Image (cartoon, grey):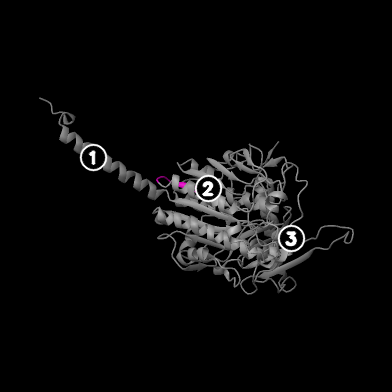
């Protein structure tokens, strides 16, 4: 007589339990192979605007804790010093020019955006089973064909462009920033017609900018909590501290001189709430969190803008203050605590690094980023150069190793109809503040760097891919 194990109830229950245990361990093993990723991307935050990066006026205990438990990146760059190009680079691993997003920022009347055929971090992770969400400022196109759900994200909640822009034509807005706006926080809803989107629909017009940082965090926490049992990718690009500056009433400091400080400290508190959620859910050992900024500080707005500290200039320039940004990477057990590296790295490197961490292949589309996972434990980096483009997409320079070459031609205007090109060569190892111009004393270095700059730009120009157009 043939033995039927399922006809024996105790044995059948044993087999069922065994299969359940195997299944649980299989799911756990898969989760370990697929760590979670959170990218927090602030807007216009300067290199010096965190305690762990040297600020003596802004208190950021939560981000400082991330640094003490993780790793500071002190030579971390964005490939452009304004919003839209910088965001395109982070998500695609490409120079903005390669994906057609290099010609300054998008506005409410812009008729183009990041093409959905581009392979983003969200596309990559979604293809291998990740839950994906974008919560915050998008600024890569506000048409349905270019919004986050066309770019690999399961959901979107946020402002589609900068918080100083008005729906639908950018008209009728207040002039920002000003001490008067900070003193009258009601202008957050009376002075702007900035929309808040849920997926592709406007759900609030105007959005109450006083609460937006906190509401982004609420949505982020909801997403992390809902997806705690499966791998997830959260992209959290905060709208602040881009002007105009607003905060909730319970953290408001009425002194206009403290406006920027107040906003950064509020962001830090909200980062703390999100990080505590990660810890409370037991996700610390399986989550990478990256905190950085989309470009340097908007210095012309003084106490409504930030500080680049030891770096030269700020937003809108190709000097270090425009494109070298604070960066903290946190992954307990994977990235050593309380460490710092000066490894030459960029937001373009995040996509290939995430692909390497998840042991997955990228598509054949050419990108400009590198796998920088080696920098988690050393200063060795595969990146040895980076091109510098102006806010309007004009080629202006290159960094190769520690040497940086710039040639900057000011815009023509009535006062300066024939502007002269200003040429610079800096050794960043000895001159982080870019004060000692070596252009005349090292002509061979200048010639070598200029030739390489033009060669690399020619390849990008030849192989550039189109944006989506309406």
User: How would you rate the neighbour count of disc 1 (Cα within 10 Å): few for under 14, some for 14-19, many for 20 or more?
Assistant: few
Q: Report the front residue among 319 and 98.
A: 319
Q: What span is in magenta? A: 229-233
Q: Which residue, given by chain and number where applicable, does mark 3 sit on? A: 180
Checking the image for residue 29, the label placed there is none
Q: Is residue 325 visible?
A: no
**Disc 1 and disc 2 in contact, CB within 8 angstroms:** no
Q: In front: mark 1 or mark 2?
A: 2
* Residue at x 31% of width, y 44% of height: 24
Q: Residue furthest top?
A: 1
Q: Report the front residue among 397 and 71.
A: 71
Could you say whether the residue bearing mark 3 is in a helix, strand or loop?
helix
Q: Which residue, given by chain and number where applicable, does mark 1 sit on? A: 17
Coordinates of residue 293 in the picture (x, y in percent): 60, 58
User: How would you rate the neighbour count of disc 3 (Cα within 10 Å): few for under 14, some for 14-19, many for 20 or more?
Assistant: few
The N terminus lies in which quarter of the figure? top left
Coordinates of residue 40 in the picture (x, y in percent): 55, 55
Could you say whether the residue bearing mark 1 is in a helix, strand or loop?
helix
Q: Is residue 230 magenta?
A: yes
Could you say whether the residue bearing mark 2 is in a helix, strand or loop?
helix
Work out how far the residue at label 1 is from the one at label 2, CA to CA, in angstroms. 37 Å
Q: Earlier in the sequence, mark 1 or mark 2?
A: 1
User: How would you rate the neighbour count of disc 2 (Cα within 10 Å): few for under 14, some for 14-19, many for 20 or more?
Assistant: many
């Amino acid at each position: 007589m043939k033995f039927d194990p399922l006809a024996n109830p105790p044995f059948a229950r044993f087999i069922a339990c065994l299969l359940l245990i195997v299944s649980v361990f299989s799911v756990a093993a898969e989760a370990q192979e697929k760590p979670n990723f959170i990218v927090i991307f602030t807007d216009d935050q300067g290199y010096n605007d965190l305690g762990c990066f040297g600020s003596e006026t802004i208190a950021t205990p939560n981000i400082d804790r991330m640094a003490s438990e993780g790793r500071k990146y002190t030579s971390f760059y964005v490939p452009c010093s304004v919003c839209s190009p910088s965001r395109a680079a982070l998500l695609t691993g490409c120079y903005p020019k390669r994906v057609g997003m290099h010609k300054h920022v998008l506005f409410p009347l812009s008729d183009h955006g990041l093409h959905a055929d581009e392979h983003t971090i969200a596309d990559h992770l979604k293809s291998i089973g990740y839950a994906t969400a974008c919560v915050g400022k998008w600024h890569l196109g506000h048409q349905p064909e270019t919004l986050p759900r066309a770019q690999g994200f399961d959901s979107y909640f946020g402002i589609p462009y900068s918080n100083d822009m008005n729906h639908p034509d950018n008209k009728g807005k207040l002039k920002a920033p000003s001490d008067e706006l900070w003193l009258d926080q009601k202008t957050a809803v009376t002075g702007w017609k900035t929309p808040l989107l849920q997926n592709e629909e406007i759900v609030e017009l105007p959005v109450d900018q006083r609460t937006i940082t906190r509401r982004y965090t609420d949505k982020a926490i909801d997403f992390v909590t809902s997806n705690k049992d499966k791998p997830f990718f959260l992209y959290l690009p905060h709208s602040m501290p881009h002007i105009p500056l607003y905060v909730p009433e319970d953290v408001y400091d009425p002194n206009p001189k403290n406006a920027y400080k107040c906003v950064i400290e509020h962001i830090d508190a909200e980062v703390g709430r999100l990080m505590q959620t990660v810890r409370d859910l037991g996700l610390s050992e399986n989550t990478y969190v990256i905190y950085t900024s989309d470009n340097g500080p908007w210095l012309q707005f003084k106490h409504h803008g930030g500080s680049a500290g030891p770096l030269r200039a700020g937003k809108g320039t190709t000097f270090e203050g425009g494109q070298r940004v604070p960066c903290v990477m946190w992954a307990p057990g994977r990235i050593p605590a309380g460490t710092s590296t000066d490894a030459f790295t960029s937001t373009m490197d995040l996509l290939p690094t995430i692909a390497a961490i998840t042991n997955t292949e990228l598509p054949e589309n050419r990108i400009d980023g590198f796998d920088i996972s080696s920098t988690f434990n050393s200063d060795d980096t595969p990146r040895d150069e980076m091109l510098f483009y102006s806010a309007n997409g004009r080629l202006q320079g290159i960094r190769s190793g520690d040497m940086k070459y710039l040639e900057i031609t000011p815009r023509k205007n009535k006062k300066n109809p024939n502007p002269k090109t200003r040429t610079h060569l800096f050794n960043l190892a000895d001159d982080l503040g870019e004060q000692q111009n070596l252009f005349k004393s090292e002509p061979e270095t200048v010639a070598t760097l200029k030739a390489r700059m033009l060669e690399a730009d020619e390849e990008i120009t030849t192989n550039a891919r189109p944006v989506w157009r309406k």
